[in-house]
Image (cartoon, rainbow, N blue to C red):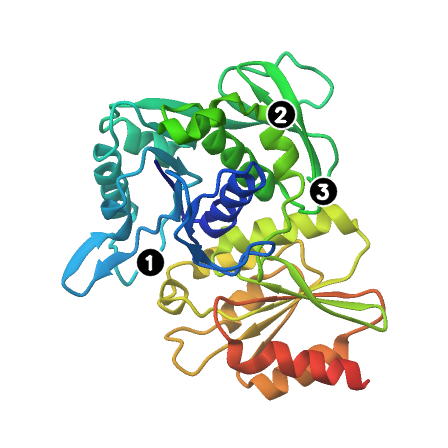
Amino acid sequence: HVIALSGTHGKTTTATMVTHCLVALGLSPGYLIGGIPQGLSASAEVGQSGYFVIEADEYDTAFFDKRSKFIHYHPRTLVINNLEFDHADIFDDLAAIQRQFHHVIRTIAQQGCVISPETPAIESVLKQGLWCEQQTLALASDVDLQADIGSGWQARLLDSAGSEFEVFYDGELCGTVSWQLIGEHNMMNGLAAIAAVAHAVSAQLPQSEASAVSITVQQIIEALSQFAGVKRRLEVIAEHQGITVYDDFAHHPTAIETTLQGLRSKLGDNAKITAVIEPRSNTMKQGVHQQQLADCVNLASQVFWFEPEDLSWSLHQVARAQSNRAWVINSVEILVDAVLAQASQGEHIVVMSNGGFGGFHQQLVEKLRRT
């Protein structure tokens, strides 16, 4: 029983959540995660059961096979977290990506399930054909009234930071997740994970795992509440003299915005949040998202942009369009000194890159600790 976690954002986190829950429930899954999960012994295990969890990427398979990787996975439970244009080095437009998602849906057996929010981009894919069960994910907007709780899976925030939320299925309250993560994006990832595990354990399994069918949604929620997270997802890497430094993998405008939104919700309007961003992905370097970059950092107090030598466009235009303070710097060493020169007690510095950033993280932390 393959559980595949796909989408533009949140694949690694959601795959780790699903794996964590299955492990905590004693189901010994196999798994393959494209990140470093906290609380698990490795990023991949063969497992000792009929479950296999995999982060399902739409990037191409190999130079000799231009189909998306996930075409080969044949999932029985497929989560599509979200769908936006990315990987501009592989795909011409969003429609090309949607075509690949349609192809993977065609591989799902009738007994399988697609779990996703009802967004226009995803709905467009599902309208091309769906031959298995569908379960929907949604955020319930009204905290006080239950009238808006409809069918499918829904989550309702109990605090502004997203560290506590109720889970409903078909209008019935299943339980409350209380964890250390923050942000609506993580809450939706968590809701998807709960739905995926619930579908997997309710499916027909080998005789040796028949006991899995007795697992309740409440037990899954309790397991998820103990989730430790994934490295490089708003991970605190240093705290010194009242300054906190985070490492975050965000490399797409939506991911940047949701990360800052979650941190701002947790810290409040008066907190000083500094974003340090390296536009490293192929899509970023091609300038596909440059029109969105100024708006996605609005919740930061100030922003430092690193402009690499091979960038084909200038970040100065983005900086001028921002509503907050911004700097554009093309040297890692100078960037470290500039960030520290502006740093003050109580500040939260979020370093956003999907790569090594030329050793920026290490240099920043080392110099900070010497101050």
Q: Which mark is residue 161?
A: 3
Q: Residue at x 58, y 41 (%)?
A: 24
**Label 3 element class:** loop
Q: Tell me the amino acid under the disc marked 3.
A: Ala
User: Residue 206's x, y, as percent?
Assistant: 35, 29
Q: Going from the N terminus, do you reach mark 1 or mark 2 first?
A: 1
Considering every residue shown, the one lying at the far front of the view is: 208
Q: Going from the N terminus, do you reach mark 1 or mark 3 first?
A: 1
Marks 1 and 2: which is nearer the front? 2
Q: Which mark is residue 218?
A: 2
Q: Going from the N terminus, do you reach mark 2 or mark 3 first?
A: 3
In contact (CB < 8 Å): disc 2 and disc 3 = no
**Residue 86 in which image quadrant:** bottom left
- In the rendered structure, the answer to whether residue 368 lies left or right of residue 226 reads right
Q: Residue at x 28, y 40 (%)?
A: 101
- In the rendered structure, the answer to whether residue 265 lies left or right of residue 201 reads right
Measured in 3D between alpha carbons, the distance from the residue under mark 1 to the one under mark 3, in whole angstroms, is 30 Å
Q: Quadrant of the N terminus?
A: top left
User: Residue 46's x, y, as percent?
Assistant: 39, 52
**Residue 240 in which image quadrant:** bottom right
Residue topped by disc 1: 87
